[in-house]
Amino acid sequence: MGDGVSEPLAYRLGEWDFYNITLKVTPDVLIPRPDSEHVVDVALEYLKNRPGERRLLDLCCGSGCIGLAVAANRPGVLAVYGDISEAALAVARSNGCADARILDALQSPPPELYHFFDILVCNPPYIAPGDGALDASVRDWEPSIALYGGEDGQAFYRSLLPDWLAVLKPEGLFAAEVGYDQAETVAAMARDSGLLDVKVRKDYAGHDRVVYGIKINEERCHG
């Protein structure tokens, strides 16, 4: 691994800053990046006028950076962290993720999680194999299981939307990081899945980076 490309500084240091918190990182997890901060922003904006305890699921959590940043900036957030990689979950636990469990985003969610969360955030694998735009240091050093999202990079979105929306309460928030050229497609999936007020947020470079929306309140629609 890393043939011809220097080990990223974050892995050499064993830690990295994200949204004003310092996280432990290893080659078992992606290095937290500013792109993912916009998912945190969306979640915190949603919570602004929603006091009290709120449950959040950070799916494909890696180091736990997104859920930890939300919880650090909003008292009362109770977070669950899910990932398919036990090695990644070990890193998340070392960062303070008390409830970190194996969850496979490509499978249907466990029934016990249905209608359990106010927020679902996710930074899923979304790179297509052979993507020439992928930086060599990412390709050579960061975990492939966290990078590649099927033949077209969109396999996880097809599972999240609509299957994983079942874990959200009515009027819950779904927010996912997307590749720079995927927002239009993922936003269409979100609308087709029944999410309302679907929006796209740009990253610091001006690329579409987060797709988010609100789960429909069926009782309100029928009542």
Image (spheres, rainbow, N blue to C red):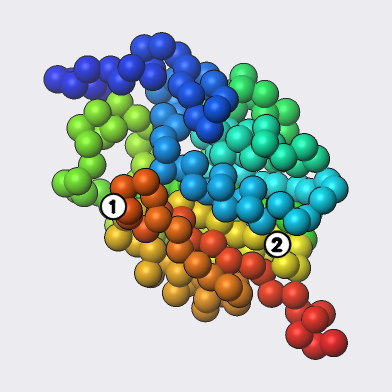
- The residue at which mark 1 appears reads as 128
Q: Secondary structure at mark 2?
A: strand
Query: For mark 2, does the 10 Å Cα neighbourhood hold few (<14), some (14 to 19), or many (20 or more) residues?
Result: many
Above or below 27: residue 184: below
Q: Secondary structure at mark 1?
A: loop
Query: Does residue 64 appear to the left or right of 34 in the view shown?
Result: right
- The residue at which mark 2 appears reads as 172
Q: Quarter of the image for the C terminus: give it.
A: bottom right
**Which of 30/38 is in front?**
38
Answer yes or no: is residue 100 visible.
no
Instruction: Tell me residue 26's x, y (percent).
Output: 45, 20
Instruction: Tell me residue 201's x, y (percent).
Output: 45, 58
Above or below 216: residue 203: above
The residue shown at (38%, 32%) is 143
Hey, what amino acid is under mark 2? Gly
The residue shown at (22%, 36%) is 135
